[in-house]
Every structure is written in C-alpha cells, then in structure tokens.
Image: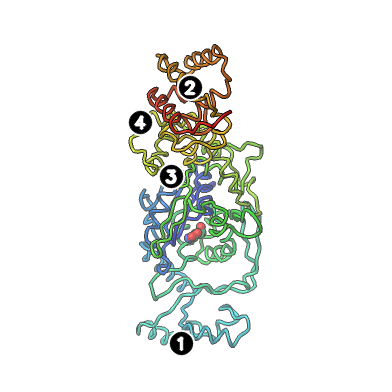
Amino acid sequence: MERKVRVRFAPSPTGPLHIGGVRTALYNYIFARQNGGDMILRIEDTDSRRFVPGAEDYINESLAWLGIGIDEGVREGGAYGPYKQSERRDIYRENVKTLLDNGKAYIAFDTPEELEEARGRIANFQYDASTRGSMRNSLTMPAEEVERLIADGAQYVVRFKIEPDREVKVNDLIRGEVVINSSILDDKVLYKSADDLPTYHLANIVDDHLMEVSHVIRGEEWLPSAPLHVLLYEAFGWQDTMPKFVHLPLLLKPVGNGKLSKRDGDKLGFPVFPLEWHEPASGEISSGYREKGYLPEAVVNFLALLGWNPGDDSELMSMDDLIRKFSFAHCSKSGAKFDYKKGIWFNHEYLGKADNALLAQLLEPTLVENGITDADPEYTAKAIGMVKGRADLVPDLWTQGDFFFRAPEAYAEKDVKKRWSADTPRIMEELIGVLEGIDDMTSANAEKIVLDWIADKGYHLGNVMNAFRLAVVGACRGPHMFDITELMPKEEVIARIRRAIEKIPVPAND
Ligand code: GLU
C-alpha cells in the first residue's frame, strides 16, 4: 500500500540556516504539497554544545518569509510531537534500551585517553568488530562489573554493534541503489550518559520512524550516514516502513571547485543566508537575502533550479508552477554551481512584476535611512512603478528614483557641460512660465504644451529637454520627463528649475 507522503525538514539549531538548508526545506515542501502530504519541521537539538540561541526563531522566520509552510512542528503542534528532540529524551532512552536488550547495541566505558591509546596501538583504529573485543565494554566485561560501574555513576556511551562484511543497500530516488560493505562502518555512538541524550543518528531514525516519515529528503552530505540508518532501521525491525531516501546534490562555489561556503559569499558579495544573522557570541553580522533586497519569490525560483530542472526551458516559475512540475527524475546527481548572478537576474524579473504598493513598503527602510520620513506611500508606489524596470534589488529603487524624494544636491558635470549653455537660464525661466500656465499636468497634456512651445520658439529640443531633466533630476537619466512631472507637485518642479538656474554656473561664452 502506498504510504501517505510525510516529509520532514530537520535542522539543528547551531547557527543561521544556510542557503543549502533552505533549498532542502524547499524541496521537501514542494514534494509534500505535490503529493497532498505533510511537511514536518523537527528541531534536532541533541548536541547541546553546539546550540546557538536565536537559531530556532531564525529558522522559523526564514521559512515563513519564503512561503515554505509547515504542517507540524514546534509552533504548529501536531499529533506526532514533541517536535523538538531535546523534549523527547524518554522516547530515545526507551529505544536505546530496546537495542541493548536485543543485543544490537552495547555499553562502552572507554575514556578519551583509552581511545587515544588504542589509536596509537592499532593502525587505522576504528571501533568495530575487529577491535571492540579489546576495549572496555559490556561485550568484554562481566555483567556485574558493568552494572556496578553504572550504579557508581561512571560515564558511558551506547554503541551500535555493526555486523561486519554485510552488503548494505541504500535506495536513493536520485542516485539509484548505493551499496557499501558494513565493515567500513564503525560502531557509532548512539547515546551518551554524560548528557542523557542520543546522538544524531539514533534520534533521527527513531523520530523518522515514529513520525511516519515516508521520504527523507536531505543534502548529499548525509549520504555517508544513510547505510548506518538502514542498518538501524533493521536493528529495530522497522525495515518495512523504512522511508525512501533522496540525497540532493551539493551546492558548489560559483567559481572554482568545491562546496559553497560563506567565504565565497563574502568575497563575491552575495549572501549565503536567507535573513541577516547577528552572531550572538561575536556580534558578527552576516548579510541575508531579505535585507539585501531580494524578493522571496525570486529566491525560491532561483533555489528550485539549483539541482533540478523542469525538463523544458521554463525559468520563471511560481511556487504553484514548481509544485506542478517538480520531480526527482529531473534532479541531478552532480553538484549545482551557485550562480548568484542568476539569482540577481531572477530578482530583477520579479521586481519588475511586483506590486508597487508592496515595493513601497519594502523601500521604506531605505527611504528612512536617507532621511525621507514623510513620503506618501501612494506617491512612493507611483514613483517606484516608473523605475522598477531598472532595478535588480530593492535598494536600487532608491538609487534609480531618489530625485522623486529630494531635489538634486549637485548636477552631473558631464551633462552640465553638454546641456547647460549661456542662454539656458533664460530658456528655463521661460519654461517656468509655460509650466505655470498648464492646469492639467498629466503627462501627455504637459508634453504637448511644452513641445509646442519649444517648436514655436525654434529651440533645440534635445538641449531644452535635457536641461529641464538636469534641473529636476540632477543628471540626464530617469524615466520619461513628463511622467516625472505628472507625479511631482508642479511647485516642486518649478522650484527645482529656479534652483538650477541659481546654482549651475553659466559658461563664460559659447
Ligand atoms: N539535523 C540534521 C541537519 O542538521 C538533519 C539531517 C537529516 O535530514 O537527516 O541537517
């Protein structure tokens, strides 16, 4: 019988969620939605030494920003909780006991010094079938001694007793059947008495089983753990409900070889985190896609195509499109280069289509940063509508449209030289008169009146219009002039022309 699709994103709250983790969450979400399944968010916080405050909130906020919905989790609740591993100690304890009782695991007392000593004594030491017989564990010690040590409070670990020389098969929906020999595996630690917590491997398997996870979709870096996980499923007798494995290709550096790292982002100027992150210990700030001015839809579209393709040449895809088109059959085995420039291209495309009122909200912090605190949101939205086609990131809306909000402080030298001649001030004075006479400043109307005036007087169209633009914008750039003057209050337009007449030095002679 086909099982209900239940997937989980299982991050460890050890810092900000890396962009690779975001892609894993996204694929899980898309697959769940495509199959009418459930998306679980499980917090894997069993490594207390690596716990970072704020990381869990960061994960939640990142997923919410990107529109990656969670059906079951710490915040959402659900029938399979708790969804935080540190709250599931009893469950793990019980399952560790099952393995011990079945002889699938054993207790080991070796101290770090003793392990060090073994490494010195035995070449290529690993704790396994070939060495466990010479170590201090419940397989080599009398039962009474084991009991006495535990009663005395000695620290111990529980190790998985891996049978050597067995073929372990992992069925991966992207990679096919991956086979390894069990002898290369060591007797992994499953539980540590010191903090009364399981290790990642045990907690992960027990939870995937109890939460009825049907597909384990995660990064390729977890592929080496998969054979161990298969063996654990078998040791528990859960092989019939073993989830299907899907190991997603690595995200690679944009240039050169190897895994994408934070350093690549710092060097080339792109974020590797969804949101800005303030490291609590050092105070270091790492940039995030949201704060840099990316739209979540663009980030989702960009990430979806890192390791998967739709099988045709479509590029711009909404979340709904992705849910319709996604399949593991079109996921690649080899790593995906993190082409951050493509990410900027996606953002440019989404910005161009985005709602102006929404963009006005997103631009607000940039306006405030530049001392514009009283902008009318409707005015801002209209101004944005005129410049968004030229913007890649949200702050570009400011660099492209700053003149909508403040008069030019300076005038572009090269444009002044080309367009501001000895009789320009006089013509600009005349232009003020023309503008004052226009009641209806809508673009087409004002354009007709001004162009008729230029033609009547026999003025040079390009010179007059560019001088006009120079006065209002500060440089010969920006959208259609009469669209600008339709939006900007007429008094402001006139005041700027007056200011330019006053401030721009007239050349000695033409
Ligand atoms: N806690 C692991 C991580 O941080 C989960 C890996 C898995 O999905 O099994 O990525």
Per the model, the C-alpha gap separating discs 1 and 3 is 57 Å
Is label 1 in a helix, a strand or a loop? loop
Per the model, the C-alpha gap separating discs 4 and 3 is 26 Å
Vertical position of residue 125 compared to residue 204: above or below: below
Give the residue drawn at x 52%, y 28%. 479
Per the model, the C-alpha gap separating discs 1 and 2 is 107 Å
Q: Residue tagged by mark 2?
A: 426
Q: For the residue with label 1, is its CB less than 8 Å from the closest atom of ligand 1?
A: no
Per the model, the C-alpha gap separating discs 4 and 2 is 34 Å
On the image, the x and y values in percent for residue 406 come to 41, 35
On the image, the x and y values in percent for residue 212 come to 47, 53
Decide if residue 103 is in sight here.
no
- Residue kind at label 3, given as amino acid type: Trp
Q: Nearer the viewer, mark 4 or mark 2?
A: 2
- Assess disc 4: are there few (<14), some (14-19) or many (≥20) residues with their C-alpha within 10 Å of its C-alpha: few
Q: Earlier in the sequence, mark 1 or mark 2?
A: 1
Residue 142: which disc?
1
Q: Residue tagged by mark 4?
A: 376
Q: Nearer the viewer, mark 1 or mark 3?
A: 3
Vertical position of residue 331 compared to residue 399: above or below: below
| Numbered disc total | 4
- Assess disc 2: are there few (<14), some (14-19) or many (≥20) residues with their C-alpha within 10 Å of its C-alpha: few
Q: Earlier in the sequence, mark 4 or mark 1?
A: 1
Residue 65: which disc?
3
Q: Nearer the viewer, mark 1 or mark 2?
A: 2
Give the residue drawn at x 45%, y 76%. 157
Per the model, the C-alpha gap separating discs 4 and 1 is 81 Å
